[in-house]
Amino acid sequence: MKTAILIDGGFFIRRYKYINGFESSDTAEIMAKNIVAYCFKHIHKINNYRLRYNLPPTELYRIFYYDAEPFDGDSKNPISGKSISFKNTDLYKFRHALFTELKKQRKIALRLGFLKNSSKEWQIKSRHTKSLLEGKINISDLKFDDIELPLKQKGVDMKVGLDIATLSFKNQVNQIILIAGDSDFVPVAKFARREGVDFILDPMLNPVDPTLLEHIDGLMTIKNMTKKEDILPKEI
């Protein structure tokens, strides 16, 4: 039996701090190693479960990590009037370093899309919308860090879908673990199950969209990276 683990990188990084044993201050090198360790703990947990029922163990086929290359363009903040080179931001440097470190890890396949800003216009961060509409604050009250340049991922979801379809149709794996929280993956989850693949979702303690929940075979999250967890029959 073989298991492939597919990771929505942006989602994993957002949920990283909620897993016991991971710290939001971890360096790119530590995070890259923790990503692999997290996946191997999935395999260990599955094999403990299978051993309990005298089933043959599974082995890790590959870890597929999906994300977008960090945006490296330039733009001017309309409030501060200062030009920003995104290539010099901490976010760019961290993501670039993380991809470099992931390439050094065993069993990792990087699948990178790109970020794009079509309008080149800045927008007010969503957390201020209600206050503005209720008149609690005015446009003149906004500071330079209350706005953002909206960037959209391109090509990432397509790569996830193609890999799930290929792994399933070519019988390369018996099981797929998807670490994500996006219901956009419902069509490929349904396809994988029709091809006989055991499809497991890891939402990393995030609430699961009901439209995704009904099209998977099970839930599995590694809640604690510092100790051995109990294995529940209904939640592998």
Image (cartoon, rainbow, N blue to C red):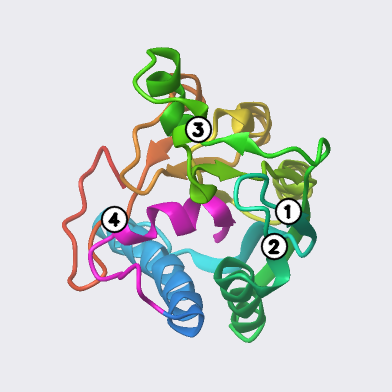
Q: Is residue 20 magenta?
A: yes
Give the residue number, with chain letter if any, for mark 2.
84
Q: Residue furthest front?
A: 140
Which type of secondary structure does the marked residue at label 2 adopt? Answer: strand
Q: Tag 3: Cα neighbours inside 10 Å, few (<14), some, or many (≥20)?
A: few
Kindly identify the amino acid type of the residue bearing the numbered disc 2: Ile
Kindly identify the amino acid type of the residue bearing the numbered disc 1: Lys
In the rendered view of the protein, which quadrant contains the N terminus?
Answer: bottom right
Does residue 24 appear left or right of residue 106 in this picture?
left
Q: CA distance from mark 4 to mark 3?
A: 36 Å
Q: Is residue 194 above or below residue 115?
A: above
Give the residue number, with chain letter if any, for mark 1.
76
Mark 2 touching mark 3, by CB under 8 A?
Answer: no
Q: Residue at x 44, y 53 (%)?
A: 14
Q: Nearer the viewer, residue 236 or 226?
A: 226
Does residue 202 appear left or right of residue 23 in this picture?
right
Q: Residue at x 73, y 53 (%)?
A: 76
Q: CA distance from mark 2 to mark 4?
A: 31 Å
Q: Which segment is the magenta one?
A: 1-26
Kindly identify the amino acid type of the residue bearing the numbered disc 4: Tyr
Give the residue number, with chain letter if any, for mark 4.
18
Between marks 4 and 3 in the image, the one whose residue lies nearer the viewer: 3
Rendering coords of residue 130 (x, y %): 40, 20
Does residue 128 appear left or right of residue 69 in this picture?
left
